[in-house]
Image (cartoon, rainbow, N blue to C red):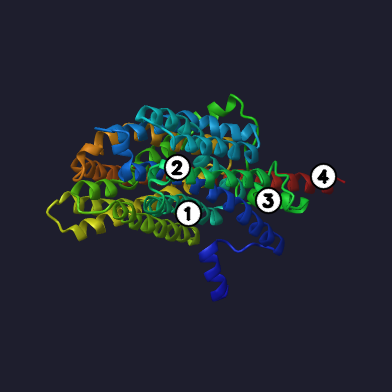
Amino acid sequence: MSVLQKARRFVWGDIPESKAEQRLLLKIDWFILSYCCLMYFTNYLDRSNVSNAYVSGMKEELNMYGNQFNTINTIFTCGYIVGMIPNNLMLQVVSPRIWLPSMQIIWGVLTFCTSAVTNVQQIFAIRFFQGVVESSTFVGTHYILGSWYKPGELGKRSGIFTSSGLAGTLFSGLLQAAVYQNLNGSSGRSGWRWLFIIDGVITLPIALYGFLMFPDVPATTRAAYLSEEERLLASDRLKSEKTKVFTHGTPTWDLVRRVLSKWRWYACSLLFAVSGEVESLGSNNLMGQWLKAIGGYTVEQIDYYPSGMTAFAIVSTLVCATWTDSTRSRARWPVLVYMSISCIIASICILVWSSPIGLKFFAYYLAGASYAGQATTFAWANQICADDDQERAVVLASMNMWNNVINAWWPLVFYPATDAPKFTKGMWAMIGTCIVTLLVTWLVWYLERRERRGKLATEEAHDDGKSMKSQLSEKVHSRESLVL
């Protein structure tokens, strides 16, 4: 392999085996990643806008007090939990090209509604239903990615997808600052209200693009830009990676037995239930709350400065995803080790309150490494469950569901807005979460390795049995020849 080929393989995954596969990969990269990334971008733009609106005037205008900001996030999370598994199972019944953009239209309309609220109770109601529909995006896309891409291609595509959500967070802070400067008070609306209007305007055209161009999954795709040969190749190229036991289709009750009788659902759900909480420093906008609480910073600075954490999160996610795909073993666990150690260091720096302001900036930015584990964990689960599409759909949804079950109360206990600026409880909780993440990562690695060894032993025994039958058949045939 030439240096150029090695570089290309490192950056973009395994080299296609033929020109036809190369053309197919270019097409699905363009149409799948473009829509999924734009969809997730608006998803995270919406989520982050609530945090940015809170520190940009919404708190004062709606007379919010105590932990009502945390309550908004908790109610959204409850809706997210309710919608998680139903949304992913609906992708087995309704065409993803119809279901995903439909959910996007609904949350776009609800985003418009947020711009007109007059009290925090209205936000509570809107955010619950937004949680229900937005839960279709994250695990739904990971299911789609696992349906189209090989293990050596999957990590960096998952990383690009995750980074698009982080880009939404990054853009939200910049957008809020620009809106506050240029539109605050325009037509009698506050800057934070204009933020939700602009967010809705961005969301709806992307949903229309999904209706027109999204290719569904290989088993059901009717995309006009794919030839019949390319549709067959899309399915065949994944069969060489792992034989499918159950493929995309309407679920039956046997699915419950298959899921609950294996270790995969339990271990993968536990892994992201724990490791997902490592993202708490970013998902709760602790840096923005810290800057607002200590004073001395303008609204624009409070919106801009946390973007450094998001930028580092994007870089960490893409570098780690690229590295895991480039390794021959497709090892995912080192990323979770890197993430956990980075966040332990960040938490210690923040806990030492007498440390310089510059060190705290460094700590919050370093905590952006927490997002690197997200793409890797779901790529790992896709890889583990590659032999059963239906089980994979449930496992991916359950991972995010159980994480959000914890996330529904976790910020209220460990990161209440009233704890700003120090968040002492939260930093100790972060250190504990990172340690547990390391332990569960080892558990999943061990169970996957044990399952792989068991399958190899079974295949070898099967091959030996075939060989013995073949030898016996040859002996019988030889004796019959001598008799004749």
* Res 55 quadrant in image: top left
Dot 2: what SS?
helix
Q: Which of 445 and 341 is in front in this view?
A: 341
Is residue 395 at least partly visible in the picture?
no
User: If you read the primary sequence from the N terminus, does the residue marked by circle 2 or circle 4 appear first?
Assistant: 2
User: Few, some or many C-alpha atoms within 10 Å of disc 3 (few <14, some 14-19, many ≥20)?
Assistant: many
Which disc is residue 480 wearing? 4
User: If you read the primary sequence from the N terminus, does the residue marked by circle 2 or circle 3 appear first?
Assistant: 2
Looking at the rendered image, the disc whose residue lies closer to the viewer, 2 or 1, is 2
Q: Mark 4 belongs to which amino acid?
A: Glu
Residue 453: x and y in percent read 49, 46
Q: Which of 68 and 467 is in front in this view?
A: 68
Dot 4: what SS?
helix
- Judge left or right: residue 211 versus residue 9: right
Dot 3: what SS?
helix
Instruction: Find the distance from the CA under tag 4 to the CA under tag 1.
Output: 62 Å
Instruction: Find the distance from the CA under tag 2 to the CA under tag 4.
Output: 84 Å
Which residue, given by chain and number where applicable, does mark 1 sit on? 159
Instruction: Find the distance from the CA under tag 3 to the CA under tag 1.
Output: 21 Å
User: If you read the primary sequence from the N terminus, does the residue marked by circle 3 or circle 4 appear first?
Assistant: 3
User: Few, some or many C-alpha atoms within 10 Å of disc 2 (few <14, some 14-19, many ≥20)?
Assistant: many
Residue 236: x and y in percent read 69, 50
Quadrant placement of the N terminus: bottom right
Which residue, given by chain and number where applicable, does mark 2 sit on? 196
Instruction: Find the distance from the CA under tag 2 to the CA under tag 1.
Output: 27 Å
Pointers 3 and 4 in contact (C-beta within 8 Å): no
Which residue, given by chain and number where applicable, does mark 3 sit on? 234
